[in-house]
Image (cartoon, rainbow, N blue to C red):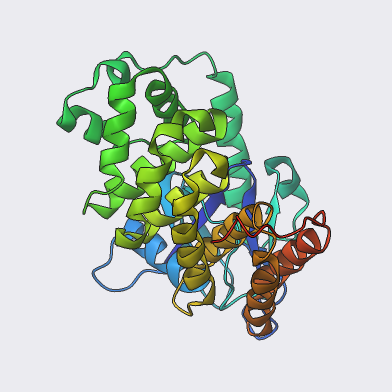
């Protein structure tokens, strides 16, 4: 029996990621949930985090676990250990698969899955049906009262669903003390805590970007100092959702320099490149002279980029081409 993990990865739209196997694999051209075999001495949780990073260059947070699936393929028997995961990354970098799709949960029933993954899809659909039945759940009172560091850190570290993340985001919107603590945790050396805290802040930003107006310049000043990639992508997402006129124009140059550096760096994660593109495009609406440099950088990136980067690059080039013509002002320099 081979122990294998897989991940039902959800994005902010509650769509699910599926990937297609290649021609020379055990199940050619079949679709599956990404994952892989456990290594010796590795826990299933460690395995799925590692496999998703290696196969897709994505960072995920584990939010739940589905029933294990045993299946006999004839030439091998597997025990499939499925996890429900959420991510901020919407563009996987494929290293082992032919293609990927984000699908609404209801559309999973029509996918040509490998046999074991069919059962995982059914179990996932059953799990969200049960969640819908339990929709009457209320925000846990202890979140609102969890001003103590240890209590709030424990709640953030142990949240296991999108709903819990939304609860915490709502609490941050309503309670400035919780908001500030999540901001603080986002810069923690504890990578798990930092990812979950910054991820939760992006959910608050999706609903109330104005909540971040007093902190935008602080975020800009921190960009070059953040060592945690998950926090960085969250903060770039927050910046991309906000009004740059709320930031002192003298800081716009810092944003431009950082985003071009990230865009042109071979080591930057795909999500960071994507958010950098969006931020630079938004700044190009203020400073049209940036558009040509941004177009050039995107075209260079697309030359050796993944299919996902090429698709996003084409979309961004179209947006740049459709920009309203605006005379460059000598007073607006970055």
Q: Nearer the viewer, residue 61 or 212?
A: 212
Q: Quadrant of residue 326?
A: bottom right
Is 308 placed above or below 325 here? below
Q: Position of residue 9 (x, y in %)?
A: 54, 52
**Residue 22, quarter of picture:** bottom right
Q: Position of residue 221 (x, y in %)?
A: 35, 52
Residue at 71 percent of width and 48 percent of height? 108
Give the quarter of the figure containing the N terminus.
Answer: bottom left
Image spot of residue 56 (x, y percent): 52, 68
Q: Is residue 302 visible?
A: yes
- On screen, residue 76 versus residue 146, left or right, reads right
At horizontal 69% and vertical 66% (from top left) the residue drawn is: 291
**23 vs 247: above or below:** below
Is residue 68 in sight in this rendering?
no
Q: Residue at x 64, y 65 (%)?
A: 290
Give the side of residue 110 with respect to residue 91, left or right: right
Looking at the image, which is closer to me, 301 or 287? 287
Q: Is residue 326 left or right of residue 153?
A: right
Q: Quadrant of residue 224?
A: bottom left
Q: Nearer the viewer, residue 142 or 9?
A: 142
Say which residue appears at 63% left-offset and 44% top-offset. Answer: 122
Q: Residue furthest front?
A: 330
């Amino acid at each position: 029996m081979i122990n294998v993990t897989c991940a039902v990865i959800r994005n902010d739209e509650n769509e699910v990621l599926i990937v297609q196997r290649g021609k020379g694999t055990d199940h050619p051209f079949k679709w599956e949930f990404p994952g892989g075999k456990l290594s010796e001495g590795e826990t299933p949780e460690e395995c799925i985090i590692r496999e998703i990073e290696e196969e897709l260059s994505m960072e995920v947070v584990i939010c739940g676990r589905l029933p294990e699936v045993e299946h006999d393929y004839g030439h091998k028997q597997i025990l499939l250990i499925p996890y429900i995961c959420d991510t901020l990354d919407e563009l996987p970098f494929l290293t082992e698969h032919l293609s990927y799709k984000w699908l609404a949960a209801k559309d999973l029933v029509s996918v040509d899955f490998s046999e074991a993954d069919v059962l995982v899809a059914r179990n996932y659909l059953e799990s969200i049906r049960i969640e819908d039945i339990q929709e009457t759940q209320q925000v846990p009172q202890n979140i609102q009262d969890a001003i103590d560091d240890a209590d709030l850190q424990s709640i953030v570290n142990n949240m296991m669903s999108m709903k819990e993340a939304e609860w915490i985001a709502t609490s941050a919107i309503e309670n400035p003390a919780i908001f500030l603590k999540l901001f603080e945790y986002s810069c923690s050396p504890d990578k798990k805590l930092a990812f979950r805290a910054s991820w939760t802040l992006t959910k608050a930003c999706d609903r109330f970007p104005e909540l971040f107006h007093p902190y935008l310049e602080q975020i800009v000043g921190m960009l070059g100092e953040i060592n945690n990639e998950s926090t960085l992508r969250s903060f770039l997402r927050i910046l991309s959702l906000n009004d740059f006129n709320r930031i002192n124009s003298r800081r716009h140059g810092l944003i431009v320099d950082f985003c071009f550096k990230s865009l042109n760096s071979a080591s930057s994660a795909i999500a960071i490149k994507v958010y950098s593109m969006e931020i630079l495009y938004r700044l190009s609406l203020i400073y049209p002279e940036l558009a040509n440099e941004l177009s050039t950088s995107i075209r260079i990136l697309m030359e050796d980029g993944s299919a996902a980067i090429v698709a996003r690059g084409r979309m961004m080039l179209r947006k740049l081409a459709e920009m309203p013509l605006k005379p460059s002002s000598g007073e607006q320099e970055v």
